[in-house]
Amino acid sequence: MRYLLPIFAGLLALPPVSATTLEKLSLDDMIAKSTAVVRGRVQGCTGEYRAPIVYTHCKLAVSERWKGATPAVADVMILGGTAKGLTQNFPGAPKLSEGEDYVLFLWTGRSGMTQIIGFSQGAFSVNMFAKSEQVEQKAAAAQTLLDPLGRPVSDDPIRMSLKAFKARVLSGVAQKGAQ
């Protein structure tokens, strides 16, 4: 018994193990499940501690609304960040950079909190490639993605011209509205 006490104390001292498992969302899934799809530029981000979770608030100056109603400056909350000296990281949570342009698939719940659908799956960087704007979804780095039946699947990020991407989203929104 006296040998078990140091082992138990040692186990308590270990950091908690965490993992994130997400359902792989197709572009059609994100279009259907989002309450808004917007393009905008990040004006700044700040941390907020809501015990026991840290969130990062990012202010997004909305330049285009492809689905739903959003204010001119949207407040998007992302799991993780730093606030009150506490830092939390959530695998797969997107990291938005001030001054950068994004297309975001957003979901606003009953609480009024607006988040990005599917963690990093719903965040697309808008970049210049060969004198044309393209959207690019960053690969989901550290989380396991599952299909609707719970089987692990690979992550194939999306990259296409902004014009084609916008047309695809608007077409999906129109199809959903026609149903």
Image (tube, rainbow, N blue to C red):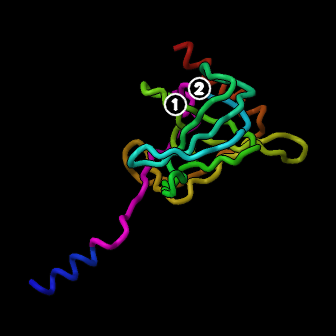
Q: Residue at the spot x=62%, y=42% of the render?
A: 123
Q: Which residues are magenta?
A: 12-36
- Residue placed furthest toward the bottom: 3
Q: Secondary structure at mark 2?
A: strand
The residue under the point 48% across, 26% down is 112
Residue drawn at the location 75% of the way across and 33% of the way down: 164
Q: Which mark is residue 64?
A: none
Looking at the image, which residue sits at the far top? 178
In the picture as drawn, the residue positioned furthest to the left comes out as: 1
**Along the line of sight, which residue is nearer the eye, 96 or 154?**
96
Q: Quadrant of the N terminus?
A: bottom left
Up-down: is 97 above or below 107?
below
> Which residue carries the number 1 mark?
107
Q: Position of residue 22 (x, y in %)?
A: 45, 48
Secondary structure of residue under mark 1: strand
Compare marks 2 and 1 and give the one earlier in the sequence. 2
Residue type, mark 2 in image: Ala
On screen, residue 96 above or below 113: below
**Residue under label 2:** 36
For image coordinates 37% across by 44% down, the residue present is 149
Side of 31 relative to 1 (left or right): right
Query: x, y percentage for residue 109?
Result: 45, 28
Up-down relation of residue 69 to residue 137 (above or below): above
42 falls in the magenta region: no
> Badge 1: how crowded within 10 Å, few (<14), some, or many (20+)?
many
Q: Amino acid at mark 1?
A: Trp
